[in-house]
């Protein structure tokens, strides 16, 4: 993996206020920012003091903040743990994108490309991968007509525009940010009530232990309730309530895998993160 040019990592950030901000804690901001530049393009990255900033259309900011020093290196939270976040990149050809990822040092592509045969995400093709520091990311390729179009006039935002210098083949942009939550219905209610989110699809998913081990490296099995909502026709949110015992609690923003979701972001990032009882980590105080 090459590093992004020094000029792209040291520019003065644009004064533009993002529509929505996704903050993620990483062990090395330089490494994480350079890695995302290798996917989304050097022109998408900036630095803001100790933080890395990666911009996606339309007005979505991914902010990378440093974790606190710990005596023992931490492993990332599991996909099924409460509050866990993953970022999903939308591509036009997932096979070509995976072939590219497999050539990047430190990247671990997990399992196989899965094609959904039926239901509201029929025709969707997806696969997860681990970044060099272990955090989960996802690739997703949507069909021209999504399965959920059979039953609703609502639509996710599929109008992302990639940077012209994006190295990841067929990258279309940030498809969604995904979260494991404690209470799916309460999470949706909060997003609809306080952020004018619209529910686009809901479904139930069952996975056996062999599938979870192959696709996510998890020795668990269970069922999951999943929903996708859209905010401002700009940001898609994927929400999972996993029916799995012994899920860990959300991590603080200064620990590996800690995250903060700022919908309708203010110019200055929120100074504090608060864990809502339903599972998201939000700027406070959290209205429920």
Image (spheres, rainbow, N blue to C red):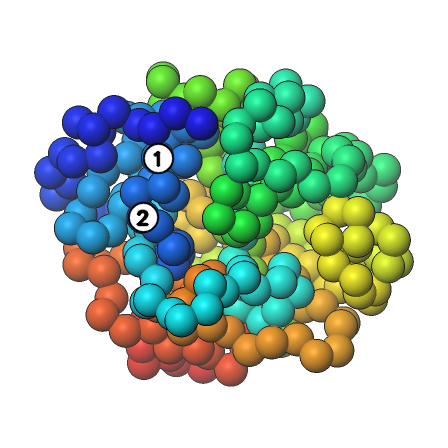
Can residue 275 be seen in this snapshot?
A: yes
* Quarter in which the N terminus is drawn: top left
The residue located at (20%, 28%) in the rendering is 6
Report the label total. Answer: 2
Can residue 149 be seen in this snapshot?
A: no
Using the image, tell me which numbered label, if any, was put on residue 34.
1
Is 162 located above or below residue 127 in the figure? above
* Quarter in which the C terminus is drawn: bottom left
Mark before the other along the chain sequence, 1 or 2: 2
Determine whether the residue tagged by mark 2 lies in a helix, strand or loop.
helix
Is 209 located above or below residue 185 in the figure? above
Using the image, tell me which numbered label, if any, was put on residue 130.
none
Q: Looking at the picture, how far across and down is residue 200, in whole percent?
A: 61, 51
The residue located at (53%, 37%) in the rendering is 106
Depth order, front residue of 271/26:
26
Determine whether the residue tagged by mark 1 lies in a helix, strand or loop.
helix
The residue located at (40%, 71%) in the rendering is 71
Q: Looking at the picture, how far across and down is residue 209, in whole percent?
A: 86, 59
Depth order, front residue of 57/198:
57
CB atoms of marks 1 and 2 within 8 Å? no
Using the rendered view, name the quadrant where residue 148 is placed: top right
Left or right of 54 on screen, residue 77 = right
The residue located at (32%, 67%) in the rendering is 68
Which residue matches tag 2?
29
Is 193 located above or below residue 26 in the figure? below
Depth order, front residue of 159/78:
78
Left or right of 16 on screen, residue 198 = right
How packed mark 2 is, by other alpha carbons closer than 10 Å (few <14, some 14-19, many 20 or more), is: many
């Amino acid at each position: 993996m090459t590093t992004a040019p020094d000029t792209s990592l040291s520019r003065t950030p644009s004064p533009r206020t993002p529509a929505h901000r996704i903050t993620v804690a990483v062990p090395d901001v330089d490494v994480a920012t350079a890695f995302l530049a290798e996917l989304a393009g050097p022109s998408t990255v900036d630095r803001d003091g100790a933080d890395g900033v990666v911009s996606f259309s339309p007005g979505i900011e991914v902010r990378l903040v440093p974790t606190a020093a710990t005596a023992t290196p931490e492993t990332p939270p599991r996909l099924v743990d409460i509050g866990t976040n993953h970022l999903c990149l939308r591509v036009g050809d997932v096979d070509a994108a995976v072939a590219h990822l497999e050539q990047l040092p430190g990247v671990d592509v997990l399992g196989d490309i899965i094609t959904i045969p039926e239901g509201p995400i029929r025709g969707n093709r997806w696969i997860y991968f681990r970044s060099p520091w272990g955090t989960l990311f996802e690739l997703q390729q949507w069909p021209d007509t999504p399965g959920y179009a059979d039953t609703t006039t609502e639509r996710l935002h599929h109008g992302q525009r990639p940077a012209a210098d994006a190295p990841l083949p067929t990258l279309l942009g940030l498809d969604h940010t995904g979260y494991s939550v404690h209470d799916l219905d309460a999470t949706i209610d909060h997003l609809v009530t306080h952020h004018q989110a619209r529910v686009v699809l809901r479904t139930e998913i069952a996975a056996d232990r062999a599938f979870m081990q192959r696709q996510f490296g998890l020795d668990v099995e269970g069922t999951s309730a999943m929903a996708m909502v859209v905010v401002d026709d700009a940001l898609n949110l994927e929400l999972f309530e996993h029916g799995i015992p012994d899920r860990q609690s959300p991590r603080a923003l200064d620990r590996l895998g800690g995250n903060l979701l700022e919908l309708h972001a203010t110019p200055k990032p929120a100074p504090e993160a608060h864990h809502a009882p339903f599972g998201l980590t939000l700027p406070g105080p959290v209205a429920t």
